[in-house]
Image (cartoon, rainbow, N blue to C red):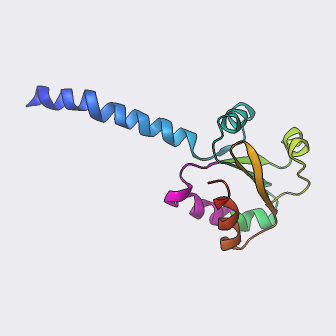
């Protein structure tokens, strides 16, 4: 029985766990990373960039809404990159972002929506759904 269990774990459980871990690494929230962002866009994955600042009261209002939305099953394929508004100057220029609390949504490698200053959960959910 012990050999059978080890065989089962080696053949099924461990690869499944590694596969799920790899999938989780592709989705969810992460700090902005240009190579990962570029790769996600090139692969056509659903991507959202959240331009946020630690001093921004609107960003603070958005944060719990975003966290709740990202827990929804339908948004699991989405990768949300949190870009520090005060640091990511090149990205702001590239995407034409002039204000913190801005979301930029991509589907199939193309921008499909954006919003600035939005704090209504349903409006943010509708925007995020455009990535799918």
Asked if residue 44 can be seen in this view, the reply is yes
Residue 1 versus residue 20 in the image, above or below: above
**Which residue is at a point 66% across and 54% down the rendered structure image?**
131
From the viewer's side, name the closer residue of 106 and 117: 106
Residue 3 versus residue 19 in the image, above or below: above
**Which residue is at a point 77% across and 68% down the rendered structure image?**
118
**Which residue is at a point 67% across and 67% down the rendered structure image?**
126
Residue 32 versus residue 72 in the image, above or below: above
Residue 65 is drawn in which quadrant? bottom right
From the viewer's side, name the closer residue of 63 and 131: 131
Q: Is residue 71 magenta?
A: yes
The residue furthest left is: 1
Q: Is residue 68 magenta?
A: yes
Where residue 31 appears, x then y in whole percent? 69, 43
Q: Majority secondary structure of the magenta segment?
A: helix
Where residue 7 appears, x then y in whole percent? 19, 26
Q: Which residues are magenta?
A: 63-79
Asked if residue 103 can be seen in this view, the reply is no
Residue 91 is drawn in which quadrant? top right
Q: Would residue 60 appear left or right of 69 to someone viewing this image?
A: right
Where residue 81 appears, x then y in whole percent? 69, 46
**Which residue is at a point 76% across and 62% down the rendered structure image?**
59
Residue 115 is drawn in which quadrant? bottom right
Quarter of the figure that contains the N terminus? top left
From the viewer's side, name the closer residue of 121 and 41: 41
Number of marks drawn:
0
Q: Would residue 100 appear left or right of 31 to someone viewing this image?
A: right
Quarter of the figure that contains the C terminus? bottom right
Where residue 93 appears, x then y in whole percent? 91, 43
């Amino acid at each position: 029985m012990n050999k059978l269990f080890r065989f089962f774990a080696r053949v099924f459980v461990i690869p499944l766990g590694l596969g799920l871990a790899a999938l989780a690494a592709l989705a969810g929230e992460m700090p902005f990373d240009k190579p990962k962002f570029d790769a996600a866009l090139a692969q056509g994955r659903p991507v959202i960039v959240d331009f946020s600042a630690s001093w921004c009261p609107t960003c603070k209002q958005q944060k719990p809404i975003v966290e709740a939305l990202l827990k929804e099953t339908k948004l699991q394929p989405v990768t949300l990159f949190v870009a520090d508004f005060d640091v990511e100057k090149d990205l702001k220029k590239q995407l034409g972002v002039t204000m913190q609390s801005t979301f930029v949504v991509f589907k199939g490698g193309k921008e499909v929506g954006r919003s600035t200053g939005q704090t209504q959960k349903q409006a943010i959910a509708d925007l995020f759904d455009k990535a799918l």
